[in-house]
Amino acid sequence: MKYIKKKFFIEGIKVRNLAKKFRTPIYCYSYKRLKENINNFKKNFKNLKPIICFAVKANANLKILKEINKFGLGADVVSLGELEKVLKAGIQPKKIVFSGVGKTSEELSFAIDKKILLINTESRSEILEIERIAKRKKRIVNIGIRLNPNTDAKTISQISTGKKQDKFGVTEKYFLELVKYVKNSQYIKLKCISVHIGSQILNHQPYLKMLKVVDRVIKKTNYKFEFIDLGGGMGIPYGKKIKSLNYKRYSSTIKKTLKKHKAKIIFEPGRSIIGNTAILVSKVIYIKKGINKNFVIIDSAMNDLMRPALYGVEHQIIPESKNNNFTKKTYDFVGPICESTDTFLTSKKFQKLYEKDLIIISDVGAYGMSLSSNYNVRPKPAEILIKGRKINIIKKRQKLKDLI
Ligand code: LLP
């Protein structure tokens, strides 16, 4: 993705032409970026030979999942819908883990029938439910138990999951009790200890703390776990000045801390695989004068990209065509929805914009389309995957008539 003669391109395709052909807003993905991210992830964690299960919640587009499958990744799913989708995408059951605090009997039963790698459980009640289903089906089910390591991930508060007050996982004490219980179960085989402390983690320190807790707890259980599932959470730079997570350091600390347990490592990355692969192309509808600033009202809104409204986070916005004519005005990029949080970004240094100009919202591949909604009866955007000079429509724009 880059400018060529002041026009923005994804691989060999001019974004302007995509907007003309498919209208806006549209999500556009680069296959090359996806490939680079996966190879980069594999390379950085090579010394661990991990099982990499893509966290489908970050992006559940079927065609994207099919591409991810071709790279040999498995999947981390959190619902029946996600599970059915990854199976349809061709991902082998033996590469699928099922996470989540509240899996229903129907979901558990389906997962058991499909013989997936692991069901990562998060409570005694869930374990008992799995036991009941397994007994009925005369099956032995492989599970993990998710530990809440009480570690602050030092990330956006709404996406932090590893502190003791969070609903995720079980406390150390409870974990030890559950291990004891499961050891004697006829229908359940405990295979994994799992953790996930949060998302968009840029500092490796919280991970180091988490690893120490995992190590300590495994020692206390005196149990041989076949897998250690370290979750995902690896952050990406959403702006130029932000440094990404030091993978190499994380990887070598994992090796150092956990090697003695001789367990296979599982990762569940979402954002780090798909986050920077996509842009959201939007058109300026109107420019309205405010006090000391101009509102740039675009045709994307919080229903298309929820992250800024939900977490107050920034996605960089760049012009589709550069004109190098910078304005002194502050621009507030906003969507058309009647909510004050339907605001994307305030920019103090942007080129002069005009109505009907195209703009690009960056790094929307993760939790972009997957968090989108039909709020305000707005149809969801189309998704397009670019491979070199090839344009693949991987999701058609929703039709209004289907919403009405
Ligand atoms: N594994 C588990 C158990 C998770 O809960 C998550 C994310 C992941 C893996 C993947 O995390 P990642 O590698 O993508 O950071 N909607 C928020 C992010 C929520 C993440 C929830 N869990 C956002 O847009 O920032």
Image: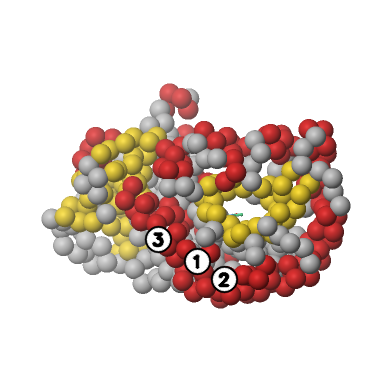
Q: Quadrant of residue 276?
A: bottom left
Q: Where 375 sits versus 151, above or below? A: above
| Depth check, front residue: 4 or 91 | 91
Kindly state the secondary structure of the residue where label 3 is placed: helix
**Visible in this render: residue 272?**
yes
Q: Quadrant of the N terminus?
A: bottom left
Are discs 2 and 1 less than 8 Å apart at CB?
Answer: yes
What type is the residue that disc 3 sits on? Asn
Kindly state the secondary structure of the residue where label 2 is placed: helix
Left or right, 177 with reference to 391: right
What type is the residue that disc 1 sits on? Asn
Q: Which residue is denoted by mark 2 in the rendering?
A: 255
Disc 2 vs disc 3: which is toward the camera?
Answer: 2
The tag on residue 47 is 1
Q: Which residue is denoted by mark 3 in the rendering?
A: 40
| Depth check, front residue: 217 or 241 | 217
Percent of width and height locating residue 174? 81, 62
Kindly state the secondary structure of the residue where label 1 is placed: helix
Q: Residue at x 77, y 63 (%)?
A: 223
How many neighbours does mark 3 have within 10 angstroms: few (below 14), some (14-19), or many (20 or more)?
some
Q: Quadrant of ligand 1?
A: bottom right
Asked if the residue at label 3 sits under 8 Å from ligand 1, the reply is no
Are discs 1 and 3 less than 8 Å apart at CB?
Answer: no
What type is the residue that disc 2 sits on? Lys
Percent of width and height locating residue 303? 46, 44
Q: Residue at x 83, y 55 (%)?
A: 183
Q: Where 135 sits versus 259, above or below? A: above
